[in-house]
Image (tube, grey):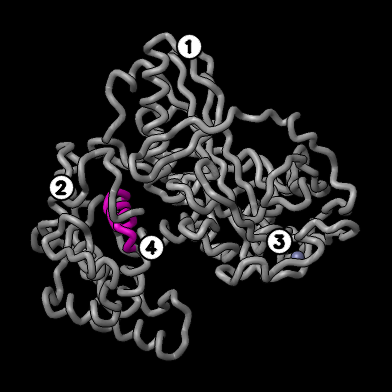
Amino acid sequence: MPVATEVRTKYEAVIGLEVHVQLLTQSKLFCSCSTRFGDPPNTHVCPVCLGLPGALPVASRAAIEYTIRIGLALNCTIADWCRFARKNYFYPDMPKNFQISQYDEPLCTDGWLDVTVEPEGGGEPRQVRVGIERVHLEEDTGKSLHIGGATGRIHGADYSLVDYNRAGIPLVEIVTKPVDGTGALAPVVARAYVTELRDLLRALAVSDVRMEEGSLRCDVNTSLSATGSGRWGTRTETKNVNSLRSVERAVRFEIERQAAVLDEGGRVVQETRHFHEDTGATTAGRSKEEAQDYRYFPEPDLVPVAPSREWVEQIRASLPELPAARRARLKAEWGLSDHEFSMIQNAGAVDLVAATVTAGAGPAEADEGGHRNRPGHPHHRQQAQEHPPPPEQMRHLSGQRRPCQPRRHPRGGQHRHHPGPQRAAAARHGAEHGGPRRRAGLTPAPRHTGPPLPARYAARRAHTTSGVPPAAAGAPGEPRAWNG
Ligand SMILES: [Zn+2]
């Protein structure tokens, strides 16, 4: 549901996102315990991660390297000298009664990540640059299980259990700068940012980014101020939002809720809030601590982190092709417009189309396979979405149905061929002989004029020009069920 019109014009939303991501290192941040997920409780523990007296931490080089990889991919400055800090607070799942984190000297600062969103009602996608305030490294806490209550929270529980397997797993916190000026798109921008960040982290191979297992967790800050006031309102922090769709819903709910409070002449309270998956609502948690409540001080048991410039440059040189660059390359290779490409992307079908093109089909046929898997498409089946046909099979299917269908190039009004049999054969040859995925034999196809548009491209163009979305796209601003 889009943000109500009167809310949109009366107030401006500012959002901020804090993402915690567990690193895929073999061992914990300050000891050699395993980080493996799903093993019996308290089987990966030692004096260091249990916080026993006299145990001393030693920082993991791999965790520091992964953090620098993330910082570089987010265009950050990498500190040449920084320290860990002690964050003091008591919680049963944190056996030392302090967390080793970073405070005023984070490893990476001042970067950005560009995200692309589609305006409500269609139109060309809009790019939003999300500033990155900091990327720092800290240790994860253990995990409490509250037994006997209805909600799984401590209130109403009969007893609690603690599992320290997670205590000490390296955790990177990525904090954005405040994101303003996105208007009614704020909830969509929040979701697009977390989606892009997840894809980036996956490409960097630093985390398995499984939101459902908690290896990627998101806190969403939202504030509202009167339009044109020049001041930002009081923010709330919605904790541990655990799906992409929920990120969007949480921001939308907070905008509507805070607008209602302000409309009645009330004040928004600075607090943490819980998000409820079933209703999409947030409810008040604890009032928010200030930084001084944690009595941060430099961690005396660890030496400072001082990565050499040579090492940082080695890491930079080893970065893989990042998602934005890969998309730009594929879009150019396939000859698609921004809008066409984002349709494939929103369907989560980029990898499928790429694999199918590599297997020998043209982008049009490969894309058709992705479309069949979309809700709203006549061929859609839930099972098909969960188990799409393998690219090899899709090549045969699409080849039989539509052997050689040229289509209009979106910009020039021209048409181009998908790869013909020669290019397909070259791709197969490359694959069978272990060649690189970039298909040396596949040069850009010649452009020429030809038959009219396939129906689905006509429908997409109607979306762009008239503002009426095709059925497959859902209502503007609606969460897209297949993308979460
Ligand atoms: Zn340990």
Which amino acid type is marked by label 3? Ala
Q: Which quadrant of the frame does ligand 1 lie within? A: bottom right
Going from N to C along the chain, the mark reached first, 3 or 1, is: 3
**Residue at screen point 55% across, 28% down:** 271
Kindly identify which residue carries mark 2.
470
Going from N to C along the chain, the mark reached first, 2 or 3, is: 3
| Corner quadrant of residue 462 | top left
Mark 4 → mark 1, Cα distance in angstroms: 43 Å
Q: Mark 2 or 3, which is nearer the eye?
A: 3
Q: Label 3, secondary structure: give it.
A: helix
Q: Residues within 10 Å of mark 1 (few under 14, many from 20)?
A: few
**Contact between labelled residues 3 and 4, with CB atoms less than 8 Å apart:** no
Mark 2 → mark 1, Cα distance in angstroms: 38 Å
Label 1, ligand 1: CB separation under 8 Å = no
Mark 2 → mark 3, Cα distance in angstroms: 46 Å
Where 244 falls versus 213 (above or below)? above
**Contact between labelled residues 3 and 2, with CB atoms less than 8 Å apart:** no
Label of residue 63 in the image: 3
373 left or right of 58? left
The stretch in magenta equals: 338-349
Kindly identify which residue carries mark 1.
229
Label of residue 330 in the image: 4
The one of 47 and 289 positioned closer to us in this rendering: 47
Q: Mark 3 or 1, which is nearer the eye?
A: 3
Q: Label 2, secondary structure: give it.
A: loop
Task: Please state the horizontal and vertical placement of residue 477, each as a whole percent of the image.
Answer: 28, 38
